[in-house]
């Protein structure tokens, strides 16, 4: 999928370059190349700067704002990331991708749990089985001290993805918060049996009975 | 754009939107912190508030096992057995259900069964006990409840008693009583009893200068047979009795009882005995109330109309019924003559005419189906010409064998 996307992006950027490359400056295609190279080497600021230049030349197309949202998130500019993902949602209202993308900067900000819950539900509305959105919803619910609903979501995820240890520990903690510590410790033990140094499960095992 | 994000985003939704996604925003707001608030309220003694927080946030049909089982538990504490049973039943079927749901379910069914039994809804009570025992076969309270709710029930009693009279003509002796009560079904009850009493009576003879005593024996036999129709809020019993009283010989009698109400209501006892000296009619209206499941009170009067005239005695009673003890106390003030009693382990009082007294009887559970009975009675006639104190103290065994086996 990644390769296909990159090929598609390459084709798109070549087209854009032919249409609008100003004389004496990097072409849009070059700017895309710079942005991808910088991202691949972890230089998210540079990757973002290249995209900002593309935006100046080509305008705020869906792809450009979605990628700026993504790179802003990687750069730790969460407010900006949020803004660009919201722009992307407006440009492609039926797309799941920007809605899911929006959950990333919200997830990274501890004080945005309500928005994270709402954004995750927006994804689930159109893609009920989306595991990533459901996991982020469960995370938000837990953080908002809605442990019962968090447990419901985690429990279903554990049923569908039994090998995902994050989902399991999430369920363990939600159950523990509701006083079922013995039940939670059973879950933490299962996690530690296959991931002996899992810090979340280890912390859970230290809960008083 | 991360490949993982793209892949996940492209997964097509095949299932319906989960209920949680459709919850209105204000309800979602209610759910935040609701669990902790509920726990805090319960800890502060506000059990009703603890439940209400959860009901406001999730309603009665939550997808959450923990919420549902907690609503059930709090409902049980609040004696809301209907909601407790419904919530436990639902909780057991939810993902994540633990053994506490089954234990709670059996407990709620048992409590509701006892409640229904108390309300006279015997058939529904049996269903509750049967279901409780299906999930928790070792539940002792459900098993006992099932026996109490059985359609066909037998109770037999065997009593022995000391009976004495203090006064100008003292007497001492003993009595034995056997009685049986048989419920053929939920609404038809038959019962009968037989009592034999023998006393040695000391009669003073001679003049005031040369007093002597003569001893004679007194024997009394009495028995009754009764049939009653018993419904949740009313009942009617008819009784025929025969008394063989000392030198008087056979005395036929008849009695009836009508009662209306369960937690509170009225009862009227009627009795007619035909003695040599004429007929004696007794009417005993009583009002009763059970403020709690375990404690009841009654108050009323006994009117006696016979050849002597009209006699009135006020009556006051109290009952305490727990799982292991049944206690009944009854006191009266005022004249009675040949009082007929069919509540306590006797048919008719030994005393002819008395002006006050009381009876206390108790059953203590020994083991399943066996109760020890204790009975004591005293009545007095503080007359200027003849003073009597009637005493009796008895010990009995009540046997209630199970006639139906739960599934």
Image: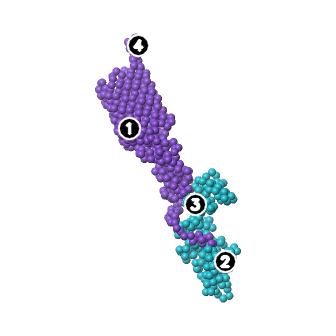
Chain colours: A cyan, B purple
**Label 3 crowd (10 A; few <14 / some 14-19 / many >=20):** few
Res B117 visible: yes
Q: Are marks 3 and 1 in contact (CB under 8 Å)?
A: no
Q: Earlier in the sequence, mark 4 or mark 1?
A: 1
Q: Mark 2 vs mark 1: same chain?
A: no
The chain letter under disc 4 is: B
Q: CA distance from mark 2 to mark 4?
A: 132 Å
- For residue A33, the mark is none
B36 and B175: which one is in front?
A: B175
Q: Which residue is mark 3?
A: A159
Q: Mark 3 vs mark 2: same chain?
A: yes
B348 and B318: which one is in front?
A: B348
Q: Earlier in the sequence, mark 3 or mark 2?
A: 2
For label 2, the SS is helix
For label 3, the SS is helix
- For residue B212, the mark is 4
Residue B56 sits above or below residue A52 on the image: above
Q: Residue at x 57, y 65 (%)?
A: A134
Which quadrant is home to the N terminus of chain B? bottom right
| For discs 3 and 1, the disc positioned in front in the rendered view | 3
For label 4, the SS is strand
**Label 1 crowd (10 A; few <14 / some 14-19 / many >=20):** some
């Amino acid at each position: 999928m990644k390769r296909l996307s990159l090929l598609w992006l390459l084709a798109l950027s070549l087209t854009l370059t032919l249409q609008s490359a100003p004389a004496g400056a990097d072409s849009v295609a070059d700017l895309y190349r710079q942005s991808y190279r910088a991202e691949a080497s972890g230089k998210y600021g540079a990757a973002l700067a290249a995209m900002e230049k593309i935006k100046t030349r080509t305008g705020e197309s869906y792809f450009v704002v979605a990628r700026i949202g993504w790179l802003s998130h990687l750069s730790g500019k969460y407010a900006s990331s949020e803004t660009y993902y919201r722009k992307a949602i407006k440009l492609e209202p039926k797309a799941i991708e920007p809605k899911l993308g929006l959950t990333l900067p919200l997830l990274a900000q501890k004080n945005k749990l309500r928005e994270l819950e709402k954004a995750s539900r927006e994804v689930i509305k159109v893609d009920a089985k989306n595991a990533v959105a459901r996991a982020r919803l469960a995370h938000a619910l837990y953080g908002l001290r809605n442990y019962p609903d968090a447990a419901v979501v985690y429990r279903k995820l554990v049923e569908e993805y039994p090998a995902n240890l994050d989902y399991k520990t999430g369920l363990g903690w939600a159950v523990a918060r509701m006083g079922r510590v013995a039940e939670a410790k059973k879950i933490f033990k299962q996690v530690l049996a296959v991931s002996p140094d899992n810090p979340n499960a280890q912390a859970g095992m230290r809960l008083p009975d | 754009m991360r490949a993982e994000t793209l892949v996940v985003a492209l997964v097509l939704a095949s299932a319906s939107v989960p209920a949680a996604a459709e919850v209105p925003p204000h309800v979602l707001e209610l759910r935040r912190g609701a669990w902790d608030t509920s726990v805090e309220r319960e800890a502060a003694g506000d059990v009703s508030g603890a439940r209400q927080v959860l009901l406001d946030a999730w309603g009665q049909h939550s997808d959450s096992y923990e919420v549902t089982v907690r609503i059930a538990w709090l409902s049980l504490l609040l004696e809301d057995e209907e909601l407790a049973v419904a919530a436990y039943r639902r909780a057991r079927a939810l993902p994540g259900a633990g053994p506490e749901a089954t234990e709670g379910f059996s407990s709620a069914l048992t409590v509701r069964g006892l409640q229904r039994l108390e309300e006279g809804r015997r058939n529904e009570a049996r269903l509750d006990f049967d279901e409780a025992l299906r999930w928790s076969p070792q539940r002792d309270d459900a098993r006992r409840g099932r026996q109490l709710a059985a359609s066909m029930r037998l109770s037999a009693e065997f009593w022995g008693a000391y009976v004495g009279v203090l006064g100008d003509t003292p007497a001492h002796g003993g009595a034995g009583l056997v009685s049986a009560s048989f419920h053929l079904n939920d609404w038809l009850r038959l019962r009968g009893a037989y009592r034999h009493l023998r006393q040695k009576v000391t009669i003073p003879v001679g003049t005031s200068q040369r007093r002597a005593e003569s001893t004679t024996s007194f024997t009394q036999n009495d028995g009754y047979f009764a049939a009653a129709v018993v419904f949740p809020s009313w009942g009617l019993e008819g009784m025929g009795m025969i008394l063989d009283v000392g030198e008087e010989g056979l005395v036929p009698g008849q009695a009836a009882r009508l009662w209306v109400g369960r937690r509170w209501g009225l009862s009227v006892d009627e009795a007619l005995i035909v003695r040599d000296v004429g007929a004696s009619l007794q009417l005993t209206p009583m009002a009763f109330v059970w403020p709690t499941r375990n404690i009841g009170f009654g108050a009323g009067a006994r009117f006696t109309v016979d050849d002597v005239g009209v006699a009135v005695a006020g009556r006051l009673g109290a009952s305490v019924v727990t799982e292991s003890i049944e206690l009944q106390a009854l006191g009266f003030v005022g004249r009675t003559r040949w009082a007929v009693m069919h509540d306590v382990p006797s048919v008719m009082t030994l005393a002819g005419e008395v002006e006050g007294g009381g009876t206390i009887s108790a059953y203590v559970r020994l083991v399943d189906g066996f109760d020890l009975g204790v009975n004591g009675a005293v009545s007095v006639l503080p007359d200027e010409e003849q003073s009597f104190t009637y005493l009796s103290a008895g010990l009995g065994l009540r046997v209630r064998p199970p006639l139906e086996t739960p599934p």
